[in-house]
Image (tube, rainbow, N blue to C red):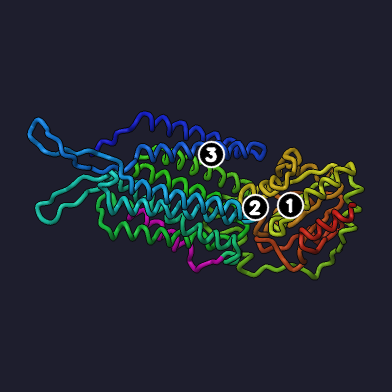
Amino acid sequence: MEHVSVNPWAAFAYLVAGVCFILALRGLSSPATSQRGNRMGIIGMTIAVVTTLLTHVPRLAMYVHADLPDGRLGAALFVPDYLTIAEILAAIGVGAAIGLLTARRIAMTDMPQLVAAFHSLVGLAAVLVAAAAFLNPQAFGIADMVIPLIGKPFFAIYPQSRIEMGLGIAIGAITFSGSVIAFLKLNGNMGGAPILLPARHIINLTVLAAILGLVAYFTQDQSPWIFWTITVLSFAIGFLLIIPIGGADMPVVVSMLNSYSGWAAAAMGFTLHNTAMIITGALVGSSGAILSYIMCKAMNRSFISVIAGGFGAAAASEGGAAKVDRPWKRGSAEDAAFLMSQAEQVIIVPGYGMAVAQAQHALREMGDKLKARGVRVKYAIHPVAGRMPGHMNVLLAEANVPYDEVFELEDINGEFAQTDVAFVIGANDVTNPAAKTDKTSPIYGMPVLDVEKAKTVLFVKRSMGGVGYAGVDNDVFYMDNTMMLLADAKKMVEEIVKSLD
């Protein structure tokens, strides 16, 4: 087996980059330190990329004439391959330009689908690296030349490298196809309702078993058909795993795909003998897995059940509809402004409807005007509100809502009973009391915000005909202490602000 030398300075630089990545994750754990965390991540990635370029510069053997003592007329002089270096730098420039342009143009409300798109690129990169390593293993230092008695010489890939390669391409392909489906659902190109295939559990288990079996067989036989069959099956299972998952589970899906992309990168790090990729991939993979666990715990569901079926799949497949024939009360912006201006405390509960309407800036203005009148204003965030983990926190931070006014579910749920007004803007499933009382409901057992306990509930919603991603109606709409504010969320909040003036 070829010995891979490690430059001690490169190892030290990768260690520094790894520390920066850990500090980045630490900073991103809180909105107040998220900018510092992003900066540490940028510094770490810059160190890793520069170190990789300096230690893996392609070199060419150039022959120069010289009068050597042994009579030879030429000697090999290794010089940098400037053409290849230029190509690498050009590719980096193109990627950086696309990234900067996307970052400047993307709306904060579109962040979930952007994250899903980025995950797909990481998965595709892992697939392409694994394919390159399989087709040209000697360039990666993962194979020895074998000269058989009969037949052509070939490069035999090391067994451990075949394991890394097989797992890398499997996880990468699953990440790519799964992220593409998640992007299409988040972007509205596909419906948010689960697509339930007949015998999907049997199909999924069969395909997964086939992939694992072929990866094991690949360690004994490096035939091309095995490698490409693993690739095709992995692309297929990524598609099959995500299409049955409904919109309400998208936060878990996004964090799960984030974990997959990390493990794919780590596997390819072993193939490329790149410590930075191994460290980064392991950090991303483990943090994504922990986040997925936290999200599932917040929904009172097991991770396996989310992957196997999709949140509220049965209800959505049966075409759940809102029960609009029940009596309900409608209010106006003037009514809402009067009630909140007379309150001692108002708790605002944002949801995906706020994100779609891009109402976060108007909401912050409304909160400022209420505080100017002496009203205490707090924001209650459910862990799975929106379409990705922390979606609501990001939007409120963009609108410069003070961090000390934003509270998680477990920290604020006990305050609703002593609150004058709960102002719900675009949240549905996360405020549905059926999760606590109706054992037949697909959201039963999921912790929800107890908005119904407030003296008055103001519920902003486009119309009474819609339902949440779980496909179930919300009993809060029809309670005596609820006033429905039917309109576009941004327009309604702007009208409330005018009424407060």
Q: In the figure, is residue 46 to the left or right of 416?
A: left
> Does label 2 or label 1 sit earlier along the sequence?
2
Give the distance between the C-alpha atoms of the residues marked 2 and 1, in whole angstroms.
10 Å
Which image quadrant is residue 55 in? top left
Q: Residue 14: where, in percent of width, then height?
A: 43, 34
Mark 3: secondary structure: helix
Q: Residue 425: where, in percent of width, then height?
A: 76, 55
Q: The residue under label 2 is which amino acid type? A: Met
Dot label at residue 158: none
Q: Residue 267: where, in percent of width, then height?
A: 39, 45
Main secondary structure type of the part rendered in magenta: helix
Q: Residue at x 62, y 39 (%)?
A: 35
> Does label 2 or label 3 sit earlier along the sequence?
3
Tell me if mark 2 has few (under 14), some (14-19) or many (20+) residues whose alpha carbon lies within 10 angstroms of its own: some
Dot label at residue 108: 2
Residue wearing tag 1: 360
Residue wearing tag 3: 41
**Quick check: marks 2 and 1 in contact, CB under 8 Å?**
yes
Frontmost residue, 75 versus 275: 75
**Quick check: marks 1 and 3 in contact, CB under 8 Å?**
no
Tell me if mark 3 has few (under 14), some (14-19) or many (20+) residues whose alpha carbon lies within 10 angstroms of its own: many
Q: Residue at x 39, y 39 (%)?
A: 52
Q: Residue at x 13, y 49 (%)?
A: 147
Q: In the figure, is residue 263 to the left or right of 140?
A: right
Q: Which residues are magenta?
A: 195-214
Q: Residue at x 46, y 40 (%)?
A: 280
Q: Residue 107: where, in percent of width, then height?
A: 64, 55
